[in-house]
Image (tube, coloured by chain):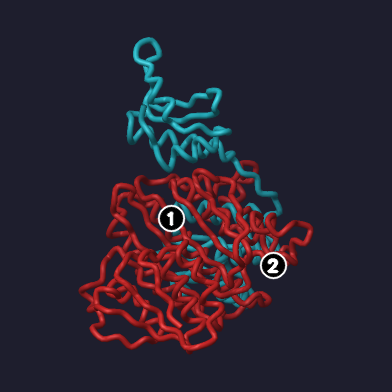
Amino acid sequence: MNIFLPQKLNFTTTTDLSKAFQNIKEPTTLIFKKGFAQPAGITLLSLLINSKREFITIEYEKQEDINYLQRTNFFKNLDFKINNISSQEDRSNNLLECTKVLTDDDPYDIDIKLKQILEAHIEGKPNLVLGILLTVYEVVDNILEHSTGEAFKETDRAIKTPAFVSAQYYNNRNNHIEIGISDWGKGIVDTLAEEYNELSREEVLLKAFELNTTRHRKFFPSRGNGLAKLKHFVLLSGGSIRCRTNEFEIIFSPLYPNGNIEEVEPIIGTHFEIMIGCYSDIDINPIFEIDYSDYEDDLDDFFN
Amino acid sequence: MKIEIKNFAPLNSHQSGIKVKKEILKELEKSEGLIVLDFEGIDIFTDSFIQQLTVILAQEIGFQNLKGRVKFRNLNDFLQKMVKEKLYIASGKKLIKREKDIDILLKRAEEIATQKSNGYLSMIKVSAGWKVFLNSPNLDKDIKKDDILNIPSFKSLDEALYHFISKPLFV
């Protein structure tokens, strides 16, 4: 069987491929053509191929058909042996190569590389840089926390099937950074549904992006603010979040600040496409500030 | 006793927070002195990391004990705000947001107008809904009716502001 990959490999075209991958039960050849690949397409395709790796071989006509994907470590991550491996010099300082996340140590490399990209491109916008780093920290932490759906672990975490993270800074008229993050876990709705059994599945998904949402409500009462804060930050940057999980796709964007949910073909795992506008700095303090005026003096004691 | 937090980096999970918390608990048992958490060299950590050193630690040893024994040093302004938020929750107070979303959106729209149009910003409500755009049309002379019609309209002001933030249009 052959699967012809779309020349534009992005969140939409790759999610459309997910059903074809789920049906793979025999040797299958993926055929690559030169085109344009975006982070969310790369991370999701990595995950899909990884899930059926034993059946899959790849085919391409010319080196240029796979150059870009090769630079993102796409083939290396999936153990495909390819000649003419790109040299380090080819690597762009716009690109966070596709990176596997399996353990608590893995985000460290992501942090270092992402900081380099942001420092190279987003000078003089310290709050924006902080917000982007926090966004990625939070989502990657969520992957490690929720991928297995197991009980909370105090010790270092490890997941069986890798998640993938990739990012690219686009220095065009609407300069922005796109971050793609895909995991092979239970999905947001299935993870939270038991804890919030009074809500419909759509409401559970919306709830995941609100403050104080956690599957450990009794254990950690103030836990689960990460996604809510990152949503707020991304919208204030003029950006958007698309998330495909279980049987839904949810979008937060300037047109849908309160979220728009569509029922779609069910998918394994959770897949994010996060676009963050980089055209100006953002005051991120209001996202975190609270009214502690009646207690301020006492709290200051902690810092003296 | 000083604990150098940078030795536990990256500070991006409950698990890394738990490692620091265990160190604090060990020191609290060993002596009766102050434990200083030194954040020198740290420019970022997650909500989950800092919860372990504030909300969860206070649940385990009591808020007053935490206040009397643990100090946070060398935090940058932003991180100090995050710690304060968590300490506020740790003290048993309910979190109340100071600003409503609309206030934050207005502030952001003003920032954009300052950068792009000398601070001139217009918000109008017409029959089709709310419109937000850069500049202030001179109502006596040159009302650019067609330009204003071309600005998209939204049912609510916050939707119009979100759209403006992503795509600030001039009239």
Residue at the outermost left position: A89
Of residues A268 and B70, the one nearer the viewer is A268
Chain B: colour as depicted: cyan
In the figure, residue A204 lies in which quadrant? bottom right
Distance, label 1 to label 2, CA atoms, is 41 Å
> Residue placed at 39% from the left, 68% from the top?
A6
Of labels 1 and 2, the one closer to you:
1
Give left or right: position of A137 versus A120: right
Chain A: colour as depicted: red
In the figure, residue A218 lies in which quadrant? bottom right
Question: Which chain hosts label 1?
Answer: A
Q: Amino acid at mark 1?
A: Met
Q: Amino acid at mark 2?
A: Ile
Of residues A58 and A168, the one nearer the viewer is A58
Name the residue that disc number 1 marks: A275
Secondary element under disc 1, as helix, strand or loop, is strand
Give left or right: position of A260 versus A200: left
